[in-house]
């Protein structure tokens, strides 16, 4: 508990905002036209920390109804114990999914608050060295894009100096492989030979379909095949991993430590994807990264680059962070302080905490909760 020299968390505030996309977006198994950001502010010690998740606005109701009372009054330095208290409080609500995203939003804000009160950049508090940088890969390439849009986005990634770029495939649940291959070839042509080409099927294929597609694209030198089959099929992922040349990756839909341990133990992936805005926040990311290291697997941060920057910089076996089109756009629209990729990487600065402040006035028109 808090003491006179160890101030408490005094307030938790949450709001949700739904922002239309700048063009129709889709992948192999889903289409969408908006993205919802659930923002959390945690206040104490004369400072306010900010965190968020990307998910349904109902996460804000979980924060108000289940989590705020658990956190308020605790020492603002006591993030890890507070995290476990939140997990215990939601036992009967169901931990995976929406509830875990709500915990993540609070946890990331709380870590930011802790760093601000201590007067430290969050990445240094988490253990990153001076001059740390975080490699990124360009991400978008939606199946809803026409050829002109795909080429334009690839050219934008090249201007950022990326060494890796990813497009979506598996259109219409993997039933249009001819267009998948054509778009992959167009991306390779635009990116040139020096950029590694990644693809993401979002679980659209069956295992042998995925293997046949990888064989057909052998001349494109793919190095990353994300969710060739559903991430729920660990046997299928492992089979694909054993039969294709690119690295097989998954994990973005993991909401707790046990999920990631099962994926690692199954030998299902070459790189473990973790989303700090879904898995429970920074506290759980650190535990998941330790499990990955024990299995000799690198970690890649899924989406939300501004939110991942600090903890990614402090992860020794990090491979990269996804510089996802939707989230880069939203983070630049509503936050002061997000770092822009240059020379293919993000470089954290020395501002206290995560260095971000939310511009409420710019976001108010999109508020839904």
Image (cartoon, rainbow, N blue to C red):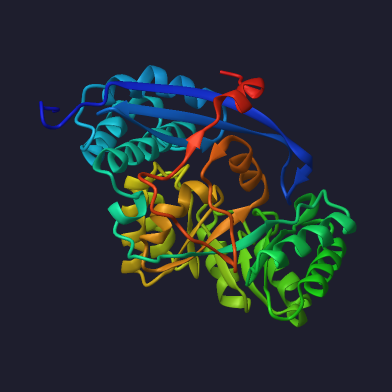
The residue lying toward the viewer, choosing from 57 and 52, is 52
The residue lying toward the viewer, choosing from 218 and 32, is 32
Taking the spot 61% from the left edge, 59% from the top edge, the residue there is 227
Name above or below for residue 207 compared with residue 331.
below
Residue 299 visible somewhere in the drawing: yes
Q: Position of residue 198 (x, y in %)?
A: 66, 67
Considering every residue shown, the one lying at the far left of the view is: 4
Name above or below for residue 267 compared with residue 4.
below
Residue 253 visible somewhere in the drawing: no
Q: Is residue 3 left or right of residue 326?
A: left
Taking the spot 36% from the left edge, 67% from the top edge, the residue there is 316
Taking the spot 77% from the left edge, 77% from the top edge, the residue there is 192
If the image is split into quadrants, where does the C terminus sit? top right
Taking the spot 44% from the left edge, 31% from the top edge, the residue there is 102
Q: Position of residue 143 (x, y in %)?
A: 79, 52
If the image is split into quadrants, where does the N terminus sit? top left
Q: Say which quarter of the image contains residue 9.
A: top left
Q: Is residue 158 left or right of residue 77?
A: right
Number of marks in picture: 0
């Amino acid at each position: 508990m808090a003491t006179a020299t160890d101030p408490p968390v005094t307030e938790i505030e949450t709001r949700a905002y739904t922002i239309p996309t700048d063009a129709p977006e889709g992948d192999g198994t889903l289409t969408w036209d908006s993205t919802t950001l659930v923002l959390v502010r945690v206040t104490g010690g004369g400072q306010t920390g900010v965190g968020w998740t990307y998910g349904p606005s109902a996460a804000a109701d979980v924060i108000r109804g289940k989590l705020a009372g658990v956190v308020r009054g605790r020492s603002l330095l006591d993030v890890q114990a507070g995290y476990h208290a939140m997990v215990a409080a939601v036992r009967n609500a169901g931990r995976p999914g929406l509830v875990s995203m709500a915990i993540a939003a609070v946890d990331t804000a709380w870590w930011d608050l802790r760093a601000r009160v201590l007067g430290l950049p969050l990445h240094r508090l988490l253990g990153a060295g001076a001059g740390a940088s975080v490699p990124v890969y360009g991400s978008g390439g939606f199946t809803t894009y026409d050829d002109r849009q795909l080429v334009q986005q690839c050219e934008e990634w090249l201007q950022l100096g990326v060494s890796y770029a990813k497009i979506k495939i598996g259109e219409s649940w993997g039933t249009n492989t001819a267009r998948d291959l054509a778009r992959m070839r167009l991306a390779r042509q635009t990116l040139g030979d020096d950029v590694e080409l990644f693809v993401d099927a979002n679980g659209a294929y069956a295992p042998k379909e995925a293997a046949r597609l990888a064989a057909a694209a052998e001349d494109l030198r793919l190095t990353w095949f994300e969710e060739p089959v559903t991430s729920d099929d660990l046997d299928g992922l492992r089979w694909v991993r054993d039969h294709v040349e690119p690295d097989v990756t998954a994990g973005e839909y993991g909401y707790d430590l046990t999920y990631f341990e099962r994926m690692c133990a199954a030998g299902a992936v070459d790189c473990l994807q973790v989303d700090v805005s879904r898995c429970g926040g920074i506290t759980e990311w650190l535990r998941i990264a330790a499990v990955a290291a024990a299995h000799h697997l690198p970690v890649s941060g899924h989406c939300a680059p501004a939110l991942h920057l600090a903890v990614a910089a402090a992860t020794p076996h990090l491979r990269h962070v996804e510089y996802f089109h939707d989230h880069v756009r939203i983070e630049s629209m509503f936050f002061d302080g997000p770092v822009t990729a240059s020379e293919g990487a993000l470089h954290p600065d020395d501002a206290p905490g995560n260095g971000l402040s939310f511009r409420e006035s710019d976001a108010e028109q999109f508020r839904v909760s």
